[in-house]
Amino acid sequence: MVTAEDIARVPVFASLDGAEREHLARAAGDISLLPGEFAAHEGDEPAVFGVLGGRIEVVKLVDGIERLLGERLPGAILGEVPITFGALFPVGFRAAERSRVMRIEPRDYHAIAAVKPAVAAEVGRLAAHRMSGSRGLSGIAAETSPPRAVVLGGRWDPASAELRRFLDRNQIRFKWLTPDAADLTVEWGGPLPAEADWPVIRLVDGKTVARPQPRRVAELLGLDTEPRAAEYDVVIVGAGPAGLAAAVYGASEGLRTLVVEREAPGGHVH
């Protein structure tokens, strides 16, 4: 259970008086995380978290490769960017060791911010700092990187469309070559595979696979295809918004939680 003393250890809430800390403590969720579990995934709905113990890594998928952007230690907050700009989480927050965080829902945060403008001002300042500069989220988003793969396939071929969809959903940067592309042989880098073998994917390391299945593509790109542990308390099939929310709540109760998804996490709320 989150206490008023826990609230006081997060500097953002230093301006709250005793009664306000008690109120926020009653509203906040107390979440214990094992190493590798997420407080928030990239793409989650807004919320504010305070780190009460342990160490939280900041991670982001860039072209399908997980990139470690930093860490947050006790006293820090998570979620200042989405709560300030009304956006989804642009990064994920994962426990690097056994950790404890408190979760504050948007309605509870805005209720406190309305009576304590200093809280909103400080959270806004932190959000602007996270976004700005070459090492901020804006700088990372502006970075360009070469494609990790080249896909050769017909414009209207269903198998080619499925392969491109899989790469797009997993945020893999690739170049798509169609039969009518200029200098097709030059762009491919050599003799073209037989058209019966299309679509064909070639990675930057030269590995080439004809008519690949999504699992094989995931393995070649280093995406997770196997569970990290032998046993789990809860297995959730489907990593859409509902599945991800269920996973967060399961993990918050101390359950070892596995999410199984056919293509990629994310989706739409209807």
Image (cartoon, grey):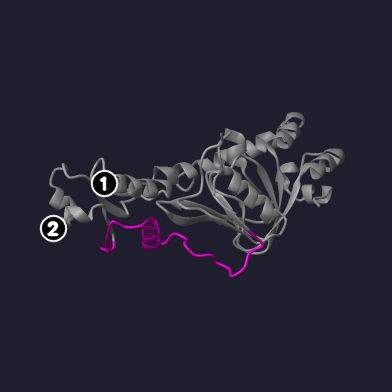
Residue at left 59%, top 61%?
Answer: 36
Residue at left 30%, top 54%?
Answer: 149
Where in the figure is residue 209, as x and y percent of width and height? 28, 61
Label placed on residue 176:
1
Q: Is residue 65 magenta?
A: no
Give the residue type that dot 1 points to.
Trp
Residue bearing mark 2 = 191
Give the residue type that dot 2 points to.
Pro
- How many other residues sit within 10 Å of disc 1, few (<14), some (14-19) or many (≥20)? some
Farthest-out residue, top: 114
Q: Which residues are magenta?
A: 205-234
Compare marks 2 and 1 and give the one earlier in the sequence.
Answer: 1
Query: Label 2's element?
Result: loop
Name the image quarter holding the C terminus.
top right
- Whether residue 185 can be seen here: yes
Give the Cα distance between marks 2 and 1: 16 Å
Residue at left 57%, top 49%?
Answer: 41
Q: Is residue 215 magenta?
A: yes
Query: Label 1's element?
Result: strand
